[in-house]
């Protein structure tokens, strides 16, 4: 809304300025044959010309993208500052020599502006392109927020991030972009009951992480790359901008971020790494919960959710059996342990 208001005011100012210039030029070259009606006509034409110029300026600014602005702005600032310094230095020299000839004064000003202007152009075109990197580094050092981690929607909905933070294994600052918060809010407002429950649980977890008792600080950031639509691509871009790691359970985001050179912390990988190691010929006790896919197989689970397939365990549903590990299979869905009987069921 403020941008539209400024544009409207700019167009009105240009129209008024065009009419004022037309009136000034008419008065400057007024002839006796020119009537007041002719003055009004010229003022109207001047106002139209002013509005046309305003429209052309706004049209030209439409092609100035954020990337182009970020590249040109430091260079233009360097050039303008250098020329201003050259002009002020020339005025100071003229002030110290009040008897200097007018022609020499012009030469002194032109020479200094030329020299400093060239220095500004050289620095602006060769050095200013890296100013944004320097400013980002300075701001990062100034904020001193430690190791930054961007949080994805999937991690918030998953909920385990709260327990991981409480355990003290996560350090630094968690960053939640506002577009992730909006996505979570849309999930919480979903018409699907399960999806709505997940969204509301995610909002509760965020609120808990923002509490004073949370061991890890959490910040909501407003950065939102305007030229990128996909949430995953925005997270990768912010990961590069903040030099932050991305916390996610999303398989596709994991792969894309790795290709782009952004470090990813996957909660599922952490959970698999924390599962106890099981070796062949190791004995364990397991309760057969349900039937397996193959004939006579029974299926049980460890406390961490690892599936255990018991060969010949189908007749012992609901009973605990002593088994011996025969092999371990790691799949994309998790780990599966294949076993056989060791002793009779108890």
Image (spheres, grey):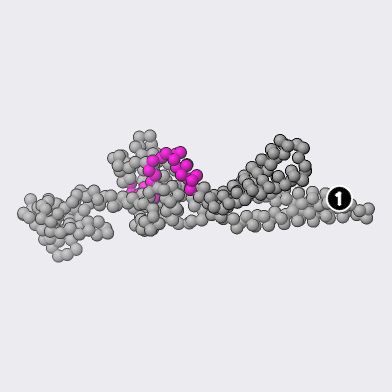
- Does residue 178 appear in this view? yes
Instruction: Name the magenta segment's main secondary structure.
Output: helix
Query: Magenta stretch: residue 134 in it?
Result: yes
Q: 163 or 277: nearer the eye? A: 277
Q: Residue at x 56, y 49 (%)?
A: 123
Q: How many marks?
A: 1
Query: Residue 92 is drawn in which quadrant?
Result: top right
Q: Position of residue 271 (x, y in %)?
A: 26, 50
Q: 233 or 188: nearer the eye? A: 233
Q: Position of residue 138 (x, y in %)?
A: 47, 42
Q: 95 or 186: nearer the eye? A: 95
Q: Position of residue 190 (x, y in %)?
A: 42, 52
Q: Residue at x 20, y 59 (%)?
A: 329
Q: Residue at x 20, y 55 (%)?
A: 307
Decide if residue 18 is on the left or right side of residue 215: right
- Does residue 248 appear in this view? no
- Identify residue for label 1: 28
Q: Residue furthest top?
A: 212
Decide if residue 282 is on the left or right side of residue 88: left
Q: Is residue 56 above or below residue 218?
A: below
Q: Residues within 10 Å of mark 1 (few under 14, many from 20)?
A: few
Q: Which region shows up in magenta?
A: 133-159
Q: Residue furthest left?
A: 344
Q: Residue at x 46, y 47 (%)?
A: 178
**Secondary structure category for the residue under label 1:** helix
């Amino acid at each position: 809304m403020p941008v539209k208001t400024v544009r409207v005011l700019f167009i009105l100012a240009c129209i008024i300025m065009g009419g004022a210039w037309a009136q000034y030029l008419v008065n400057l070259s007024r002839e006796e044959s020119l009537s007041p009606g002719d003055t009004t006509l010229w003022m109207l034409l001047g106002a139209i010309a002013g509005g046309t110029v305003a429209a052309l300026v706004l049209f030209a600014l439409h092609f100035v993208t954020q990337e182009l602005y970020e590249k040109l702005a430091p260079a233009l600032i360097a050039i303008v500052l250098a020329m201003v310094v050259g002009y002020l230095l020339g005025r100071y020299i003229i002030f110290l020599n009040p008897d200097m000839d007018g022609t020499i004064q012009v030469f002194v000003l032109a020479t200094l502006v030329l020299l400093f202007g060239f220095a500004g152009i050289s620095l602006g075109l060769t050095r200013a392109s890296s100013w944004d990197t320097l400013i980002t580094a300075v701001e990062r050092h100034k904020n001193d927020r430690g190791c930054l981690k961007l949080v994805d929607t999937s991690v918030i909905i998953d909920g385990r991030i709260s327990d991981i933070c409480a355990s003290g294994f996560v350090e630094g600052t968690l960053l939640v972009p506002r577009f992730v918060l909006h996505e979570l809010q849309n999930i919480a407002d979903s018409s699907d009951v399960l999806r709505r429950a997940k969204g509301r649980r995610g909002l509760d977890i965020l609120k808990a992480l923002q509490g004073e008792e949370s061991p890890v600080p959490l910040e909501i950031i407003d950065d939102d790359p305007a030229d990128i639509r996909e949430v995953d691509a925005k997270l990768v871009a912010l990961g590069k901008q903040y030099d932050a790691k991305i916390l996610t359970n999303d398989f596709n985001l994991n792969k894309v971020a790795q290709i782009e050179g952004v470090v990813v912390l996957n909660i599922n990988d952490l959970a698999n790494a924390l599962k106890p190691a099981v070796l062949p010929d190791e004995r364990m006790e397991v309760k057969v919960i349900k039937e397996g896919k193959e004939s006579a197989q029974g299926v049980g689970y460890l406390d961490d959710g690892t599936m255990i397939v018991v060969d010949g365990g189908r007749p012992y549903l609901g009973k605990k059996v002593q088994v011996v590990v025969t092999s371990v299979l790691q799949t994309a869905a998790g780990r599966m342990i294949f076993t056989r009987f060791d002793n009779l069921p108890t």
